[in-house]
Amino acid sequence: MHKKIYILCFVFLILIPGSSLVYAQKGKRVETTGKEFDLPAKRLSVEERRKFDYYFYEAMKAKSVNKYDAAFDLLKYCQAIDSTNANIYFELGNYYSLLDNKNRALDFFRKATAYDTDNFYYNMAYASLCLEFKQYSDAIEQFEKLTRKNPDNTDLYLYLAEAYRQDGDLASAVSTLDRLEQIVGLNEKVSLQKFQLYTMMKQEKKGYGEIQKFIDKYPAEIKYHVLLGDLYLQAGKKDEAFAVYSKAKAIDPEDPYLISSMAEYYEQTDNKEAAESELRAALVSPKMDIDTKLAILAQYVGTLQTNNQGTQTANALFDTLMVQHPQEPKLNLMYGNLLMIQKKLNEARFQFQVYADANPTNAFGWEQMLSTTFPDSINLSIKICKDAISYIPDQPQFYFYLGMSEYLNKDYTNALDALQKGVKYVDEKNVGLLSDFYGQMGDLYYHMGKKDSAFVAYDKSLSYKPNNLGVLNNYSYYLSLERKDLDKAEKMSSMTVKAEPSNPTYLDTYGWVLFEQGAYTMAKIYIENAVKYSEGDEEKQSAEVLEHYGDVLYKTNEPEKALEYWIKAKEKGDSDSETLDKKIKTKTYIAK
């Protein structure tokens, strides 16, 4: 009670206006945390006023051209001249807010309001930051003060209601929105907020009553009936929802939004046939625009996935829409995405091709096509990349995948050419992609026998992204094959194993580097784990890993077991080892 009386007394105070100087204020009566005290303004001499005005003007000029350091220094100089000027504290608060030093900003905004209690912007800045810092009582106090002084500013009531809501005072939040409603009249946004608040307060009847107000005032407006039905359905009140939808049908049975809601109702009541029938009716309705239809379809597909149901039933709905809208590429794009979910890659690619043909300068269509081919259909991937480049030659991703595809085709010269052209289009800020480009170039150079160029490319790749695991692995492995810079190789390879301790490729590389360093016991541990983690996975368990394990077994005095794994490597059939046959024949390790 004492706090309220104090505020009431404050309203009747008549403040003395400031002097002729724009930026300096007289002392004001200030309210903060329920108390009032005087903050006297500093009396400036004529010379001090002249200096203050000059340097403040220079600070604002520097700020306008983004010279924030200079502006800050000038503002601090102004503060030294007049430490009671609210404008200075407000500007410094903004400065610290930009630097994301919100604690300092809050302190400066508080001081700005203390020296100028009536300034709308100072109080808004302080109140908003209080809300962000969860200092709800201070935020509420400020917003209450602002609404009293600016009763026609409707946004303030929304801020105040939100402050009350976050503070847990839901009743006061509703009361604030009631005050707003007296100003703006019946308002959908306000009513929906009140509905949510009443729901949180477990006063559902009052909440639904907020929506019922619109139905009572606009009984022929079907959208309010549908809204109320949807809210009932969201709350699991299916009988109440159906009753409201039935009343809506009496107004307009062909309303597409009602049909969509009815479909959702039937879906929730496990009447799949009725749900699909309603959806089909909505999709063929001439009253509904294509974007809304696509949104409904997307929601339907999402529901099928969430409920672990097959998505095949949605295909017929897409077919219906495509007959109705044959020239709508967005429909082809969405249908392609659905077919991708169903792993129907050829059909999906056809839909993406239609979209790409209609939007040839949009990279997304080509990227989606590429996702249906790479890395399984290399020649198709090459064609898609080349087609995309012919329309949008400045998109580096297509050069990268073209280079990758040519690399897999063992056409190293064309692969390198594609990467060298594409890297010129990569944004310097995209260090990840730059690292991948140069890493791939390193692989190509090595396969082309240009080993020094390979290692230069790897170094450049890692200069962009030091933790590029693929590059670290390949670089260290090729160094080990060259028996060169083994300490560097060990350091790089250890980073990959720490990052992914169960990755067979990284384990094998690290083990092989240790092998080349002569640390056979340690090498055996890592290569043995590489074999273990790749068991049962044909792609991960390569002949190379099996041969390496045989090598390290031989070096750790297990020649019979070594022979067993050399034979297994031979049986894999994908070995390019020059010495494997000799090892099996002689039952002896032979260095490459």
Image (cartoon, rainbow, N blue to C red):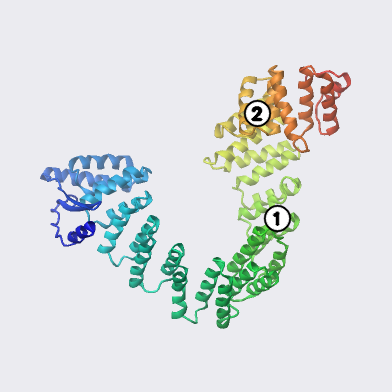
Judging by the rendered image, the residue that carries numbered circle 1 is 340
How many neighbours does mark 2 have within 10 angstroms: few (below 14), some (14-19), or many (20 or more)?
many
| Front-most of residues 260 and 75 | 260
Which part of the image, by quadrant, shows the N terminus?
A: bottom left
Q: In the rendered structure, which amino acid carries the disc numbered 2? A: Tyr
Is residue 272 shown above or below 3? below
- Horizontal and vertical percent for residue 497? 64, 30
- Horizontal and vertical percent for residue 120? 27, 57
Label 1 secondary element:
helix
Q: Quadrant of residue 160?
A: bottom left
Label 2 secondary element:
helix
Is residue 572 shown above or below 168? above
Q: What's the residue at 44%, 72% (across, down)?
A: 210
Judging by the rendered image, the residue that carries numbered circle 2 is 475
- Horizontal and vertical percent for residue 190? 41, 68
Residue 211 located left or right of residue 72 = right
Q: What's the residue at 61%, 74% (across, down)?
A: 259
- Horizontal and vertical percent for residue 54? 20, 45
Q: What's the residue at 28%, 48% (across, down)?
A: 109
Distance (Cα) linking label 2 and label 1 = 35 Å
Q: Quadrant of residue 55?
A: top left
Residue 130 visible in rendering? yes
| Front-most of residues 462 and 172 | 172
Badge 2 or badge 1: first in the primary sequence = 1
Q: Are marks 2 and 1 in contact (CB under 8 Å)?
A: no
